[in-house]
Structures are given as structure tokens and as C-alpha cells.
Amino acid sequence: MNKGASVDSRLAEGREFIHGSRSIVVFTGAGISTESGISDFHPGGVWDRYRIVTYPEFLSSRKSRQEYWRMKSELYVELVRARPNPAHLARLEKSGRLMTLITQNIDGLHQEAGNSEDRIIELHGTNRKALCTGCSRIWPIAEIQDRLE
């Protein structure tokens, strides 16, 4: 790709490359879902108001668990309002050329857009469900939110 070219010509070159490809693997991150209303790591987002609670902290500290669930509760509001946008790549999968979609996102919008679960690798897990550390049951996040409220 010509780095000195205009954005439009680089986009055209990228489209041409994709259209000429038969087997594509895509890696996405937070920017994909920003247009859908999901906060990213930029100042002012939900991540700016809360610190990351590590898994060992979550397991060992009731206070850390409460902090974690306060943040998740705020993020839940964004999650239920968010809708997929064209960058969630369902059209590319429907074309038969998307083999694997690797995402850092936890919002589940790639699946909601119509991408197949078996083609998606969620590197950081998902916000659509929660695992009970006591019994290992998987819960829909809506049920957890109801309990928090």
C-alpha cells in the first residue's frame, strides 16, 4: 500500500485487495464498535472512570468485585443500546471470503451483525455472559444486570 497516497486512494487499494482475495482473516479492536456507541479507551469513556480489576483481585476482594460490577453495570447500558455497524463485517462473511474474525472486543456486536460464532475468536472474552466462579454456570449478562439492580 502506498503510504504517501491519499486516504481515498488507499481505501480504494484496500477494497481492490479484499475483492481479489478468496480467504481473509481480520483482526478488530475497539474502534470498530465506537460508531455503535461502545466506549473505547479514549478519555471520557467508561474505561477512564474505572480502573481495571484483575482476576486475582476479583477473586480475593469483595471490594474489588463490587468495583468491577459497578463498572460492568455502567457498560451494560451501552451494550444493550449498541447496534452493529458495517465495520462488524457480516457482509464480508456472507461473501464467503471471511475465514476467521479475531477481535479484542467484548461487546458481541460481530455476532449480532450476523457473523458465525464458529468463525469468531474473542481474545478478551465477552460482555454478553458471565461465569459464576462458585458453580461454573454461565449466565446471560441481562440476568446478572437484573440482580445488580
Image (cartoon, helix red, strand yellow):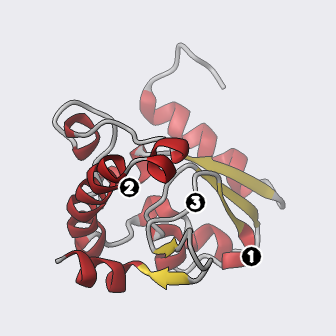
Q: Estimate how packed mark 2 is, as few (under 14), some (14 to 19) or many (20 or more) residues with alpha carbons within 10 Å.
A: many
Labels 3 and 2: the sequence-earlier one = 2
* Near-viewer residue (15 or 140): 140
C-alpha span from label 3 to label 2 = 15 Å
- Give the labeled residue for mark 1: 118
What residue occupies the far right of the structure in this picture?
22
C-alpha span from label 1 to label 3 = 14 Å
The tag on residue 125 is: 3
Q: Is residue 63 left or right of residue 84?
A: left
Counting from the top left corner in percent of width and height, residue 147 is at 26, 82
- The residue mark sitting in front, 3 or 2, is 3
Instruction: Give amino acid for label 2.
Output: Ser
Counting from the top left corner in percent of width and height, residue 122 is at 63, 59
Q: Residue at x 29, y 48 (%)?
A: 63
Quarter placement of the N terminus: top right
Q: From this view, report whether residue 144 is shown above or below residue 5.
A: below
Q: Estimate how packed mark 3 is, as few (under 14), some (14 to 19) or many (20 or more) residues with alpha carbons within 10 Å.
A: some
Q: Residue at x 54, y 32 (%)?
A: 10
Instruction: Give amino acid for label 1.
Output: Asp
C-alpha span from label 1 to label 2 = 20 Å
- Give the labeled residue for mark 2: 33
Counting from the top left corner in percent of width and height, residue 4 is at 53, 13
Q: From this view, report whether residue 136 is shown above or below residue 67.
A: below
Counting from the top left corner in percent of width and height, residue 115 is at 60, 76
Q: Residue at x 16, y 36 (%)?
A: 44
